[in-house]
Amino acid sequence: MTDTTRTLVNFNGRIVMIGFGSIGQGVLPLLRRHIGLAPENIVIINPDPGPEPIAAEYDAAYIAEGLTIDNYRELLSRYLRAGDFLLNLSVDVSSVDLVRYAHEVGALYLDTCIEPWLGSYVDDNLTPSQRSNYALREEMLATRRELGDGPAAVITHGANPGLVNHFVKVALQDIARDLGHPLPEGQGQKDWSRLARDLGVCTIHIAERDTQRSRTPKDVDEFINTWSIDGFYSEGLQPAELGWGTHEKALPADGARHGFGADAAIYLERPGAATQVRTWTPQAGPIHGFLITHNESISLPDYLTCHEHGQVAYRPTVHYAYHPCDSAVLSLHELAGRGWEMQSRKRLIVEEVIDGMDELGVLLAGHDRNAYWYGSQLTIEEARQLAPHNNATSLQVTVAVLAGLVWAIENPAAGIVEPEELDHERILEISEPYLGRVTGAYTDWTPLTGRGTLFREDLDLDDPWQFHNVRVV
């Protein structure tokens, strides 16, 4: 197990960080702690000059400029060279264009999600499918096929997507051991997909409950969150998306397929911030979470697909089920009432959090033990002891960024890779010391638990894990 003090890897190049919001500010101390590099070899490019003192605290050069579609090549050419690392922690900057530029220059790359240029999420000229994470991922996969081999570019590697993709592999191993099922001999895509199929896993929830709170309550016309407000707003206004499993009996009335690409996921004709689902975590118990679109909801079902005779024989349903901090829930409620027009004031709570935890994990359901949750239970007190400039939510992301960055340095010629293609044991070796209590728990809860007694509901009693039962309507 990696400790929280030693250098993990030496790096002779420069790290050029794009964006310096809550995740950039939280990851910077970890870079200084765990990456052996010259003091002058961190450059931060960010349009807001406000957080420059935090950069100065860690001897990082700060360039108060924003990347746009018109200036990104010229701006990056001043600082990025062959052998450097382009760390993209921004919003509203095209991930595909930055991956292409890093490949062209000969630099390594990592991001936490696939982003388009500013405005694409809410462009009325685009269809819901064109505004989806599914479309963004397909564009990135097409770029991978076009570029071929080259410098490592780790895409979508934060907490989720990223860390949770590795949690799924551990959870599959735990369930197999507990059921007396043999573990896969290999670590390839077919090994993991067959294991999930043979165990009977039909549904995977990325199940998260954030209970962190501030001493100062939310005010009217204010959006509060424990991580990037702009990032949450953007993905919340994208259509709700989920990987669509082979056990599902019927497409939702407002559901649609994309008609191109891997066909591993569908979208709903409504934003994720207005769509709720039922899920369960060990600490919180049953909860209603928002079905926010995330890349893991698309890459995981694609990765866990089994084919027979050229046809899809098995695929699990996969989606995010996110209960953010209570102030963020109130903020979303107010946002919806405003017709999705962002509030005039935003408050990111990091240093002002007084208590609470972020319970982030994966719930694998449908097997002989019903459902199994595996993940991280990290309190704000633990987060503050482990790393400065972090709350519990950001630390789960920033340590995953650190782990992905280390993996890329150790595998510099890997090309463009998704989280499922990384060594999950290496990633978790680096991450776990920063994740609080990492645990697994079985539950007999299903989406049918406690329902059908007080109100008439149209439920599928034969299969509790049908999305029809999971969705809150």
Image (cartoon, rainbow, N blue to C red):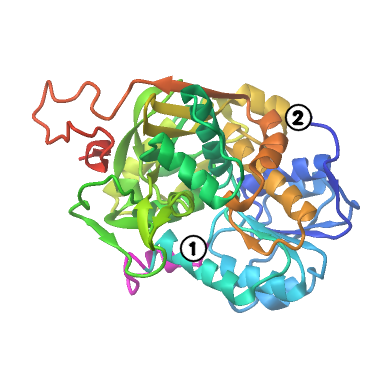
Residue extending furthest toward the front: 309
Residue 364 picture location, percent across and down: 42, 34
The residue sitting at the left extreme is 456
Counting other residues with Cα less than 10 Å from the Cα at mark 2, is it few (<14), some (14-19), or many (20 or more)? Answer: few
Instruction: State yes or no: residue 127 in magenta.
Output: yes
Residue sitting nearer the eye, 29 or 314: 314
Mark 1, residue position: 137
- How far apart marks 2 and 1 lie (CA) works out to 33 Å
Residue 264 lies in magenta, yes or no? Answer: no
Of labels 2 and 1, earlier in sequence is 2
In the image, 188 versus 61, the foreground residue is 188
Across and down, in percent, residue 127 comes to: 32, 69
Residue at left 72%, top 37%?
Answer: 430
The quadrant of the picture occupied by the C terminus is: top left
* Residue range (magenta): 115-129
Q: Which mark is residue 94?
A: none
Q: Amino acid at mark 2?
A: Met
Q: Is residue 353 left or right of residue 287?
A: right
* Residue at x-position 72% and y-position 33%: 387
Three-letter code for the amino acid on which mark 1 is drawn: Arg
| Quadrant housing residue 8 | top right
Helix, strand or loop for the magenta stretch, by majority: loop
- Name the residue: 25% across, 40% down: 466
Q: Quadrant of residue 173?
A: top right
| Above or below for 136 versus 167 | below
Residue 274 picture location, percent across and down: 29, 47
Q: Residues within 10 Å of mark 1 (few under 14, many from 20)?
A: many
Which of the numbered marks, if any, corresponds to residue 1?
2
